[in-house]
Image (tube, rainbow, N blue to C red):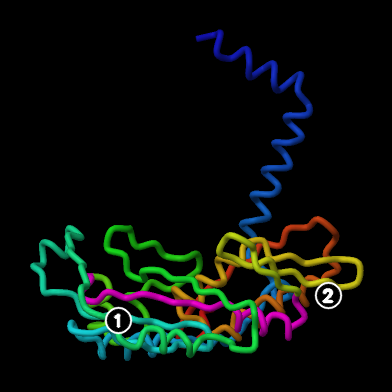
Amino acid sequence: MPGCRVPLRFIAKSSRGLRTRLDRQITSIVKSLDIPGPERRIDLEANHHKHELETLVSDLNPSSFTYKKIGDGLLMTGLRTRKRTLSSKLMAQHTFAWNGTKDGFEEAVQCIVDRESAENEIWYGLYNNPTSEYRLGPGMVPMFCWPIDLQAIRDIFFYDVALFSVYNPVHLMHKLREAGFNVKSLRGQRGLKVEKVVGDRAFAVEDLGYFTTLITGEFFDEESVVECLRSTSEMAVRAAVGPYTRIEMQIEEYFGSKPT
């Protein structure tokens, strides 16, 4: 159809602005596919608490909640669910109704509270929600490849256990401040505002939620998360990154020997 070709010829010949923007976009895409060189790559040996999760799952029973402190700010709790058929597990059909008491819950939460701080918060969530799809975090290793017992992984995925996370970010806030970051709570919502001022420039963390999920969902050590942010900010200073520059971090988790 000849009429379909006219707009394309018009854009190519008459709209230099569109062509310029297109060239910039293509250049940006090509750069994003570049493999980072040594000067833009940071190798960190991060600690994790995945084995503590394995221990918790093995200790769960159907009659009462079990609590386990994982790191300074994270408390994991849960219990075993009723036995179900394989088909109900695969179809995510479940019934969870707890009529018993959560004995020891308040005392367990107290172990992640900083009694000398007025910034304590409690972020509560269902860890293995059977009604939602399993989503792998960017750069993370799938749970089936975690260095923990396979039975614990089966229990989590097939909802043979119900796990809940209780997180207090106050300890992470303290550690970030010790590393030179300014930290503020976001009033009325879950989250933190984090930035680091160097001279006349401020390096702001755009989405700290990704990093707190590393702690509550991937069981990263809080100190490892802080070190990741600190190292990145120092690298930006050494590279003399200009103002209003967005630094994209591509985090890759691996176990064992370093991939080539």
Q: Nearer the viewer, residue 91 or 149?
A: 91
Q: Amino acid at mark 2?
A: Arg
Q: Which residue is mark 1?
A: 102
Which of 224 and 8 lies nearest the eye of the viewer? 224
Residue 58 is drawn in which quadrant? bottom left
Quick one: quadrant of the C terminus? bottom right
Residue occupying the far left of the picture = 85
Q: Which residues are magenta?
A: 158-181
Say whether disc 2 or disc 1 marks the residue closer to the N-terminus: 1
Classify residue 162 as left or right of residue 221: left
Residue 48's place in the image compared with 159, above or below, is below
Q: Which residue is found at the position 65% from the left and 84% from the top? A: 117
Q: Is residue 160 magenta?
A: yes
- Percent x, y of residue 201: 86, 66
Answer above or below: position of 240 versus 188: below
Q: Nearer the viewer, residue 139 or 89?
A: 89
Nearest to viewer (mark 2 / mark 1): 1
Residue located 83% across and 73% down the image:
237
Proximity of marks 2 and 1: CB atoms separated by less than 8 Å: no
Image position, residue 27 (x, y; %): 70, 47
Residue 235, placed above or below residue 17: below
* Residue 209 at x, y percent in the picture: 56, 65
Q: Quadrant of residue 125?
A: bottom left
The amino acid type of the residue labelled 1 equals: Lys
Q: Residue at x 86, y 68 (%)?
A: 240
Q: Which mark is residue 44?
A: none
Relative to 11, 258 lies left or right: left
Q: Horizontal placement of 210 versus 24: left or right?
A: left
Q: Which mark is residue 238?
A: 2
